[in-house]
């Protein structure tokens, strides 16, 4: 089963229990979860950027509180100290730890290494005005296509799971995936049902 | 597909040979770590959505400029 950035974020934050269920199926049913390296970088970037944005908000709050602290009637000094500590902790230990945790996640699935070839194909896709239209999605999708091309074997069934219907549900994508015998799913539940069918058939 | 008939996958990085228990333990540790940031998951998803909407809007504006209509 091939998947992408949303899958990583979902299992990281436990937003979709089906994703954890899929992981359990890896051992029981001989299922391999394959995710592009690019998606791991994207997920890490998403989390880092959100934490950095939070620090900017803390800075704004500190600015307001420091102004208020000049007034003799305001007792905001403990608040300022707490916010300063929170910001320092967020940017140092937590971010470093975050990167280590994301590295760990890469060990529990198979990873499609990002390469110059994938980047070049994604760039050509952009020039040709082919879906998906977002730069990050193109790199993810070209990683998936490369893997599918390399692994054309009759005994191997490939399923591509993405929650991102708005960016991936295009006729050209459906046609390309179908030509490589990759089945496309926009819901983890549907994907699990299909895996069950395949397992029962075998 | 039983495990003893596992197909060798091409084009993927060699992974560590981990048991399911070890994999689930890693997942559990990662999830535990992120639980220290209440609300971060929702925030990340919102940020991601916001960024993607901005990209959509920029693309629509570009098309409007070059082609005079939305594609």
Image (spheres, grey):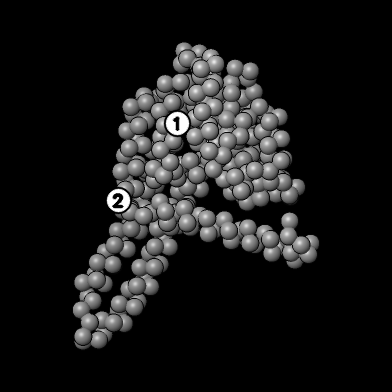
Residue at the image point whose x is 54% and y is 43% from the top = A163
Residue at the image point whose x is 45% and y is 45% from the top = A9
Q: Nearer the viewer, residue A28 or A78?
A: A28
State which chain disc 1 sits on.
Answer: A
Q: Position of residue A183 (x, y in %)?
A: 62, 30
Q: CA distance from mark 2 to mark 1?
A: 25 Å
Answer with the quarter of the image where residue B63 lies.
bottom right
Residue at the image point whose x is 50% and y is 23% from the top = A196
Q: Position of residue A195 (x, y in %)?
A: 52, 25
Answer with the quarter of the image where residue A75 lies.
bottom left
Q: Is residue A42 left or right of residue B65?
A: left
Q: Which residue is mark 2?
A: B36
Q: Which residue is mark 1?
A: A22
Q: Is residue A70 visible?
A: yes
Q: Position of residue A181 (x, y in %)?
A: 66, 27
Answer with the quarter of the image where residue A168 lies.
top right
């Amino acid at each position: 089963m091939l998947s992408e950035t949303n899958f990583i974020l979902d299992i990281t934050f436990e937003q979709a229990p089906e994703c954890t269920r899929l992981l359990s199926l890896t051992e029981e049913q001989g299922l391999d979860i394959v995710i592009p390296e690019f998606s791991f970088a994207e997920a890490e970037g998403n989390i880092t950027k959100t934490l950095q944005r939070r620090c900017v908000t803390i800075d704004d709050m500190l600015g307001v509180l420091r102004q208020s602290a000049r007034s003799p009637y305001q007792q905001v000094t403990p608040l300022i100290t707490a916010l300063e500590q929170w910001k320092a902790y967020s940017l140092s230990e937590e971010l470093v730890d975050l990167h280590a945790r994301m590295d760990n996640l890469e060990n529990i699935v198979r990873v499609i290494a990002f390469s110059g070839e994938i980047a070049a194909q994604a760039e050509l896709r952009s020039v040709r005005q082919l879906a998906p239209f977002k730069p990050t999605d193109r790199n993810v999708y070209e990683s998936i296509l490369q893997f599918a091309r390399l692994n054309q074997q009759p005994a191997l069934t490939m399923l591509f799971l993405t929650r991102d219907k708005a960016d991936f549900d295009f006729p050209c994508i459906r046609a390309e995936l179908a030509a490589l015998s990759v089945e496309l799913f926009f819901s983890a539940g549907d994907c699990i049902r299909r895996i069950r069918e395949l397992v029962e058939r075998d | 597909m039983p495990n003893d008939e596992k197909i060798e996958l091409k084009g993927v990085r060699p992974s560590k040979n981990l048991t399911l228990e070890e994999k689930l333990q890693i997942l559990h540790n990662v999830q535990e770590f992120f639980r220290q940031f209440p609300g971060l998951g929702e925030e990340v998803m919102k940020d991601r959505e916001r960024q993607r909407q901005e990209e959509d809007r920029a693309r629509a504006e570009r098309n409007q400029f070059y082609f005079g209509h939305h594609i």
